[in-house]
Image (cartoon, coloured by chain):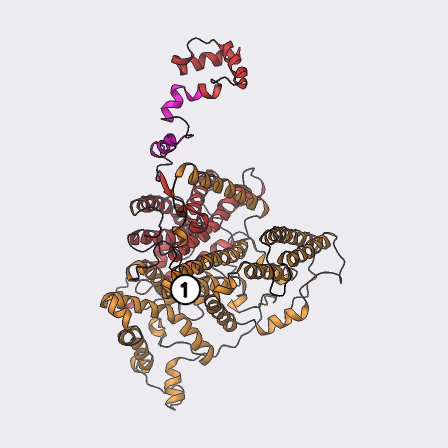
Amino acid sequence: MRVFLLGNFLRLASPVQWQNFSGISIRVRVESSFEGLKVSVGDYIRNSQIWKSVFRHPAPTDRRNRVVVMLTNFFLHLHPVSIKQQGIALSYTWCMGGITFFLFLVETITGVLLMFYYRPTLEWAFYDIQALRDVQTLGIMREIHRWAAHAMVITVWLHMYRVFLTGSYKPPREFNWVIGVLLLVLTLLLSFTGYLLPWDQLAIWAITVGSNMAKATPGLGTEGPGFQLFNTSGYELITNASDAKFLLLGGRFVGEATLNRFYILHCVAIPLVVSGLIAIHFWRVRKDGGISQPL
Amino acid sequence: MLNPHPDLTASVLIGLGWYYLILFAMNMWWTVRSFKHDGEFRNGVPKAAFWSVVTSLLLMTSAYHFTYPPDGFLIQMPLWFKDFFNAYFSNPVLYFLLTIVGLVFMIAAREWWIKPTVAWTLLNVSLLFMGLSLTDYDFRQIVGKPDNVPIVAMLFIVAFFTWLYFTRAVDNDRRIAEGRPLFEQEDNEKVLVWPDLVYTELICMVVLTAVLIFWGIALQAPLEEPASSMKTPNPSKAPWYFLGLQEMLVYFDPWLAGVVLPSIILGGLIAVPYIDFNKRGNGYYSFRERSFAVTTYLFGFLPLWVALIVLGTFLRGPNWNFFGIYEYWDVHKVEAATNKNLSQFFWENLGGIPKGSGPSDILLRESPGIILVIGYFAALPPLLGLTVLRTYFARMGVIRFLVFSNLILWMAILPIKMLLRWSFSLKYIVGIPEYFFNI
């Protein structure tokens, strides 16, 4: 019965080729496909209207379709159609840029899953993370998220190391290097803002140490040189409730406002900017001549 | 001071057993490789024979750990070595100088240490050192912290890629000298991205996913006590990738170490493509064609960034005191700090004015330091441009050269301040705490 229904369904999907077959004959086809007949269920699916609406051409098994797949597939079109052999050698690229991007995707996926669970409030933040560790089935998402974050920091450095050592920042790729530096900063900021979210001792004191630096910003921090310039007679512009540290923390100390602020920065604001810059970075790689090679 | 903890529990021994088993597998592969390559040492001993001995020793070591040997029969880092190491290597001065020496050696002897046998031996030695050190309780306490594991991995990864770079750069340098085409230019036909690149990416993603899942299962992410603004941990550390910056706080005030210097680092990185006028070395590995640029980058990345992170993470304990890798993090360790400002040196030691009765005007008091700093950033660049760096000046033009020379001078202030601190106990070159302006 089930086979019969399947047959009807497939007939709907691809009326041209399968008009003459009943559901029973599908079963026959499935079995006979092992005997070397050309038409199998796989072919049937690949010939259906649904499949063809998604993939515009046959499988990339011959030269023509291997070219076409790069041009028609959204995810693959970031790549060129053909590329210099040495340019993609692992000993040349170290694959670090690609790995960084992959880790960014891992962070996005695990991060979104964690957002379903985690509540960024003083009351719940720590205990949600604790529950992820102790009771939640998919609590390992937090481990993967943290380790991938550490790995991403390292792979960004290594990507930069490789790009420098091959002189790939030289013309015409100067501007893409600049975008790369911005992405490096944002990666560190992503990791830094995420560091606070577990709301344990490790988190708040690391952020306290880090954000104490903001207090020393020249001109804008109450413990930095030159802020007195803004505090003229009687009116104080830069105080500990208005300086750079206050801006960063949303308060004089690391507190609930900070948690909220870092949560938004970590989950929304910085990822948005990073996504945009990654798009430009990739686009420029292509426009500036692809993976660098000897001129 | 050594921690008297009895430290080799069964689980540590089993862990070490696995560690040596991995070392064994690595060297097994290496033995097969050297057998195929069929090389000999200078004294005629076949390389494969040597490595097979190493391999079998490692297998025996591994098996020995799995038998859980009793106390007294353990393979441990000898106590005298730990004492020696703690006594003579436990200070930031030697640590930093050694990283500089290491960098110089790495560049000068690059043709030697990139040789596969040498590099493999170095890797084995460092892994054995690590394995032996893991028998020490205090070492394990620091290295085994979940958040520190990536740093240990990073050390080996950075070392590997530095080796890879020098291997390819030395090869290309030779090719250029002999007028042969570059390595990147040989067999450099165009291939289709599907399948050649797409499959590499797919395999990469699968392997990485597996690694992350395994890592996530094997090592739990850290979660300490709930946050409390009452209990300040000692030491309080920033996230590990900022510990190089935190280490700079020893030598500079927060406004420099935490704000100005990081901004200069980023500005300098952004400026790199616009001040590097050297057109050679674009798109391939080379050292000789751009030795200055590469040396500068290696100096900034290896001793000033990676090594300072290691210093801040593994070697700075309570009160940000320096602790050797086998040393117990004693909260009560006291280090004498009798640092003096340059103005004190100038008026009291040099001018003979009794303490406290120097000039009361701040600018006059600090004038020696102010003159030095202005001279360093304003007078030195033109001087350099007219003398040592004349060719750079001619090729770069005024603005480019001023940016370049100032960035180099900014990069140099950390080592300079370190040296002044260590040799003269100098606290501030310019010290105006009234306005938080201390350099």
Q: Residue at x 54, y 19 (%)?
A: A34
Q: Residue at x 28, y 71 (%)?
A: B391
Query: Which chain's colour is red?
Result: A
**Chain B rendering hue:** orange
Q: Is residue A60 magenta?
A: yes
Q: Is residue A27 magenta?
A: no
Q: Determine which residue is flagged by label 1.
A: B300
Q: Is residue B435 above or below residue A86?
A: below
Question: Residue B302 appears in which quarter of the rendering?
Answer: bottom left
Residue B172, given in percent of the width and then of the height, sits at 41, 58
Quadrant into which the C terminus of chain B falls: bottom left
In the foreground, B112 or B420: B112
Q: Is residue A44 above or below residue B367?
A: above
Quadrant into which the N terminus of chain B falls: bottom right
Q: Dot 1: what SS? A: helix
Residue B126, given in percent of the width and then of the height, sits at 58, 61
In the foreground, B95 or B394: B394
Q: Chain of mark 1?
A: B
Residues in magenta, as a range: A45-73
> Would you say the magenta stretch is mainly helix, strand or loop?
helix
Query: Does residue A2 appear anywhere in the picture?
Result: no
Q: Is residue A46 above or below residue A177?
A: above
